[in-house]
Image: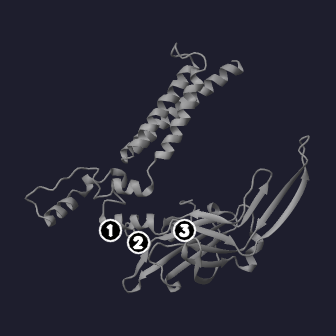
Amino acid sequence: MTFAKRLTGLSVIGGGITAGWCFYDSFAAMDKGDMDAGFALVGAGVAFGVSAAASIGTIAVLGGPVGWIAAAVGVGFLIVASLLTDSELETYFKNFLLSDTEKFPKPANMSPMEYSLKILEKKDELTDDDFLDTLMNPLDAQAKLFDYIVCKQIVFNPNNSKKETFSNSSFEPGMGTITTSLETASSFSAKMVFSRFFNHPDQVEAYAFFYPKGVENQGTIAMNMGAINKIYDSENGEALEIKFWIPKEHESKITLRSDIVFALRLKVDESQGLHFPYPLAGKERFLGAKIRARSLSAGLYVSDLNQSEAVTIAPLDELKTKKPW
């Protein structure tokens, strides 16, 4: 078999798989009520299917550059689908128990109380199967809503970073010298902005865990937690800042594989044992994020230890494993 034939075969297989995934993602998007992104994915699937067919000459009229044009159109549809994909809040309001996706009109002779009880009675029918565990129960749905709007990002900055720089001559002609730098820190500050709930540092319960060989290899080392402060910045106003650091005797264990998992929750009402994030499915949960303690920059690859991470919400025991990451 010639190289050209092998290349064509791989192109057909790749196009077919891509088309299949597009149709699958389209079904999943439409099932969640995201119709515009779903239709864009259908267009992408058709385009990639045409491109694959053109590669093997299945359709006679698809000679010449049509296959490549179809592939380009498919990529365009994928970009459109990405732009049209619903946000977490849009998905929430299209699928929670009281959304209007499933029509359930109130009979004229039914009182509001009777109608509310009827909704609760039919809640499993009014909620999409993908959201039965999170959006069917009104209390669980409230917990998820606050997850989406209260705190979505945590900004981490190193407090004691040290940078090492190495220069090596390139083996490639004309490339000159390649500079590589390693930045390491054992102490960090975490900054969060809450849209509500946070009023005083005493509300905060926070933990940080150091994994010398990465979170997937366990070997957890509890980090020291410092002062919890209310700070103000020109961009977001009131914010919460926490400092934490690796114990001195473990600093030598930091490598490029090392991870740090940060977790916290807020005491909303201590008398009732109520925290944010709210419990979901009967499980207490924490806001969490995973960061690196050492970064590498070499050539075009650049990274540093100033990290802005999307929040992951899960029980504390789960955040300490590789599952959420």
Q: CA distance from mark 1 to mark 3?
A: 22 Å
Q: Are marks 1 and 2 in contact (CB under 8 Å)?
A: yes
- Residue type highlighted by circle 3: Gly
Secondary structure type for disc 2: loop
Q: Name the mark on residue 288.
A: 3
Q: Decide if residue 40 is on the left or right side of residue 228.
A: left
At 57% from the left and 29% from the top, the residue drawn is 71
- Residue type highlighted by circle 2: Tyr
Colour setup of the view: one colour
Which quarter of the image is occupied by the C terminus? bottom right
- In percent of width and height, residue 132 lies at 33, 56
- In percent of width and height, residue 169 lies at 92, 50
At 49% from the left and 37% from the top, the residue drawn is 21
Return the disc, 3 or 2, that comes first in the chain's sequence: 2
Secondary structure type for disc 3: strand
- In percent of width and height, residue 303 lies at 72, 58
Return the disc, 1 or 2, that comes first in the chain's sequence: 1
Say above or below: 192 vs 165: below
- In percent of width and height, residue 185 lies at 74, 71
Q: Which residue is mark 1?
A: 139
Examine the image and state in which quarter residue 270 appears: bottom left
